[in-house]
Image: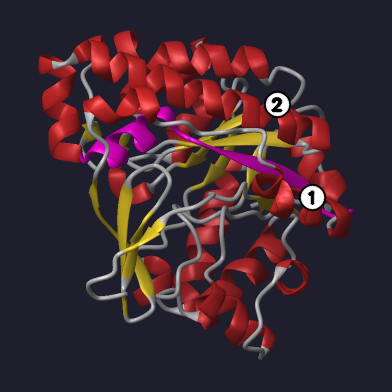
């Protein structure tokens, strides 16, 4: 499994079969597959082995946070993001970071606890490629201050937005460098830059605020492949994603008009492609037969020549039908043998 993932990650040569990967599998899905209430790194890896995955994400941990005392059903994390729990699921509920708080706000990359999951995954996952995650500058800034205020501040308080983005980016650069020192095989930047109709920011604001942070990260992480996760329609961003040095893209959301065949034809020699199996409708409401046909079609378009990971369009959340997840994995094994002959 690991060998196929590394061949695909580095886009050098052809793996034996299309490797499977996803950023995260929901605990409920793992519990159901493994028939256990306990979910830890060992159980997660056992689940991934059972499904036939070739790569696993190692996540840095947040530090601190404050419970919302009035209902004890949520918390404010170290970034100032408010989260609430509804029926056991976590939902973003707003941002609390204000301009006057920024100078006193510190995110310390040296806290050893942050790397506990990274270390444990690396120690237990020698048969997987391990991709270390770092958070996004745009996503963290947007959610820390709240979307409405963030978009207003881009126009009204650009110096504050620039300072905030620079501070966040500096933190994640240090986290990523430490992950590389610990031994991850690649770095995954999770930064949702678009929605279904296109990017959240104009090209002018992307050039001013966001792309410089990516250039700094790619330079800092140059020892390993750097993969970007972003949802949404990013067709207009792909040229710049390549230009700043990103080497792979996840999740190529099909319902956001990301045509895997066109992306492969235009960027398949420049980018490792990960994703394109819809987890919003297909894996939650589709039939096993529809899943198999979609996987077959996706592999036929994206896998020839290598440099492709079969993956969902966001993650394996608890709404995904277990039968459809298994159908996806079986179809990948069935149709994903090289040379691709479908």
Which residue is under mark 2?
177
| Mark seen at residue 134 | none
Q: Is residue 245 visible?
A: no
Which residue is under mark 1?
119
User: Would you call the spot at circle 2 few (<14 residues within 10 Å), some (14-19), or many (20 or more)?
Assistant: some
- Percent position of residue 65, x then y: 43, 54
Left or right: 326 with respect to 209?
A: right
Q: Which residues are magenta?
A: 126-146
- Above-or-below relation of 158 to 17: above
Quick one: SS at disc 1?
A: helix
Would you say residue 130 sits in the magenta stretch? Answer: yes
The picture quadrant where one finds residue 295 is bottom right
Residue at position x 49%, y 18% from top? 214
| Location of the N terminus (image quadrant) | bottom right
The picture quadrant where one finds residue 35 is bottom right
Q: Nearer the viewer, residue 75 or 306?
A: 75
Would you say residue 67 sits in the magenta stretch? Answer: no
Mark 2 and mark 1 in contact? Answer it, CB < 8 Å.
no
- Percent position of residue 112, x then y: 71, 43
């Amino acid at each position: 499994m690991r060998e196929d993932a590394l061949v695909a990650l580095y886009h050098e040569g052809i793996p034996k079969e299309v490797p499977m990967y996803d950023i995260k599998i929901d605990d409920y899905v793992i519990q159901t597959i493994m028939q256990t209430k306990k979910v830890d790194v060992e159980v997660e890896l056992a689940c991934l082995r059972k499904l036939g995955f070739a790569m696993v994400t190692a996540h840095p941990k947040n530090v601190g946070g404050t419970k919302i005392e009035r209902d004890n059903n949520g918390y404010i994390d170290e970034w100032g993001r408010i989260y609430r729990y509804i029926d056991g699921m976590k939902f973003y509920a707003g941002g609390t970071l204000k301009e006057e708080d920024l100078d006193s706000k510190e995110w310390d990359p040296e806290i050893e606890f942050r790397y506990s999951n990274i270390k444990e995954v690396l120690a237990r996952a020698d048969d997987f490629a391990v991709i270390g995650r770092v958070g996004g500058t745009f996503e963290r800034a947007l959610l820390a201050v709240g979307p409405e205020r963030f978009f207003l501040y881009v126009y009204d308080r650009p110096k504050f937005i620039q300072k905030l983005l620079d501070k966040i980016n500096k933190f994640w650069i240090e986290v990523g460098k430490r992950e590389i020192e610990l031994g991850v095989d690649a770095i995954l930047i999770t930064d949702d830059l678009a929605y279904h109709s296109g990017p959240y920011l104009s090209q002018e604001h992307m050039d001013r605020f966001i792309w410089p942070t990516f250039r700094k990260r790619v330079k800092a992480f140059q020892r390993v492949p750097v993969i970007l996760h972003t949802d949404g329609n990013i067709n207009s961003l792909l040229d710049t994603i390549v230009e700043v040095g990103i080497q792979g893209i996840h999740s190529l959301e099909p319902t956001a008009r990301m045509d895997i065949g066109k992306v492969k034809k235009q960027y398949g020699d420049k980018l490792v492609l990960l994703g394109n199996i819809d987890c919003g409708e297909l894996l939650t409401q589709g039939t096993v037969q529809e899943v198999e046909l979609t996987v077959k079609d996706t592999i036929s378009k994206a896998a020839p020549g290598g440099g492709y990971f079969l993956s969902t369009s966001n993650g394996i959340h608890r709404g995904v039908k277990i039968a459809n997840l298994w159908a996806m994995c079986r179809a990948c094994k069935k149709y994903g043998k090289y040379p691709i002959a479908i």
